[in-house]
Amino acid sequence: MIYDLGNIYYSTLQGVRANSTASKSLDKEAFLRLLLQELEMQDPLEPMETKDMISQLSQLTSLEQITNLTSAVRDFVEAQTSVNPAQLASLIGKYVVVKNNTVNLKDGEADSIIFSLDQDAHVVVQILDENGNVVRTEDLGTVEAGVHGWQWDGRDDSGVSLPDGTYTYHVYRISTDGGLEEIGGIEGGLVEAVQIKDGEGFVLVNGSLYPVDSILEISQEGDA
């Protein structure tokens, strides 16, 4: 199973990177140089006491430990936010269910919009064009719990056929107070290939690319 750790560690990674490039604190080499300079310039008649020397060296040791710990944390965060090619490749041939909110319209025919309900609900579907304008609103009425599909006819609210392209959709259930609660859509199929773009992993399902973090379920072929 793949876990999405990006949201947990990304801000920490950015903070570590910012501190590493803009830090104004002393590193252990600078600290040691200052200590040696202090020893060279001390009054021979009143040299640094042993306890003060031990205190200074203890600070140096603590500084080095903190530096090592910071480096270890940075390496851990880098590992968590990177894509593992071997793990990604292992998805090929698996059946996955992914979050989806796009529908393709070609030659007046659209893909089925699939959604899942955990309980009976009054469902409304909205279709939006590339500019984010709502072009179609469909009230599906009360729908029973389970997985369902709705076939858009490619027309707007006025019955006019819309041009081919990729549209965005939202599936909502109407709450008891009349508000809209988005439940989203899903898509399922075999992973045909995987890709890495700008450090982010994608799976190719039914001819479309989906981010790895959109995967909701993974199963062996034929088990879904």
Image (cartoon, rainbow, N blue to C red):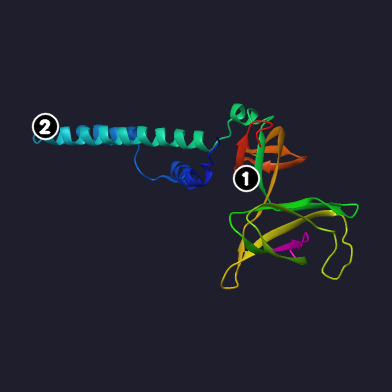
Question: Up-down: is 35 above or below 216?
Answer: above
59 with respect to 209 (left or right): left
Q: Position of residue 199 (x, y in %)?
A: 62, 37
Q: Nearer the viewer, residue 102 or 81?
A: 102
| Residue 33 visible within the image | no
> What numbered label is drawn on residue 214?
1
Marker disc for residue 107? none
Residues packed near mark 2 inside 10 Å, few (<14), some (14 to 19) or many (20 plus): few
N-term mark: 1 or 2: 2
Mark 1: which amino acid? Ser
Q: Residue at x 20, y 36 (%)?
A: 56
Q: Amino acid at mark 2?
A: Thr
Query: Is residue 11 found left or right of 222 in the rendered image?
Result: left
* 130 and 214: which is toward the camera: 214
Residue for badge 2: 50
Magenta span contains residue 125: yes
Marks 1 and 2, Cα distance to the nearest angstrom? 61 Å
Q: Position of residue 47 (x, y in %)?
A: 12, 34
| Tag count | 2
- Where are the magenta residues, as a range? 124-133
